[in-house]
Amino acid sequence: MRKKVLLLIGMIGLGVCLIIAGGKRSLIAQEEWAETEGEWEVGGYEFPVYTDINSPDNHFIPSGWMGDYGDITLDENWQENPHSGETCIKITYSAKATQGNRWAGIYWQNPANNWGTVDGGFDLTGASKLTFWARGEKGGEKAEFKVGGIRNRYSDSAVAGLGPVVLSKEWRKYEIDLKGKDMSYIIGGFCWVTNQVSNPEGCTFYLDDIKYE
């Protein structure tokens, strides 16, 4: 009888452990689902905008070409001297004013080509900054960088910027301060803009490890 009681207690204990373990698995599954749906909670977690070209963590796409888009050449798979990983982004701006605007830029959007016409983006509430690494081909290249700012039927909840920045030939880390910003709905995860006045001969620069922190 005593052995049966002990066995029963052991089985109950095992059942409780399995329930607890199952509960933990459910919580993990919920967290993964929430991340997939675009919700993000602070706690030392980094939310990549764009890393290596084949990374599963690329949440925004460099699809929003603006201004003299014909002056832009984009290589998302540049393998020479990335800041980290196997690739970085190479951008060349010719300053030829192909569309007559004398400026150009690219938005990283979610989903691709979303100028606020469809529901997308991410809830990045709690993010205090966006960081990225950049360098110029020769040094002295000038560009401005931005978060948010897309306005349409669905609009970014915030806008913040940095620049104009004068790049050096060496990789350098930059950050856009997001403290106090409403980051609950971000379609335009990252953006760069430059112009003919700042780079009359055109310019080439590189970007890597763009992420929210």
Image (tube, grey):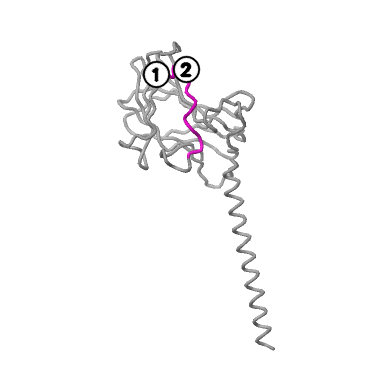
Residue 3: percent from the left, percent from the top?
65, 87
Badge 1 element: helix
Quarter assignment of residue 164: top left
Q: Which residue is mark 2?
A: 67
The image's mark for residue 71 is 1
Left or right of 162, for residue 200:
left
Residue at 59% over, 29% down: 158
Classify 10 Å Cα crowding around label 1: few (below 14), some (14-19), many (20 and above): some
Residue 151: percent from the left, percent from the top?
60, 23
Residue 188: percent from the left, percent from the top?
54, 29
State the residue lying farthest toward the top. 100
Badge 2 element: strand
Label 2 close to label 1 by CB (< 8 Å): yes
The answer to if 65 sits in the magenta stretch is: yes
Residue type highlighted by circle 2: Gly
- Magenta span covers which residues? 58-71
Residue at 32% over, 25% down: 139
- Cα separation, mark 2 vs mark 1, equals 9 Å
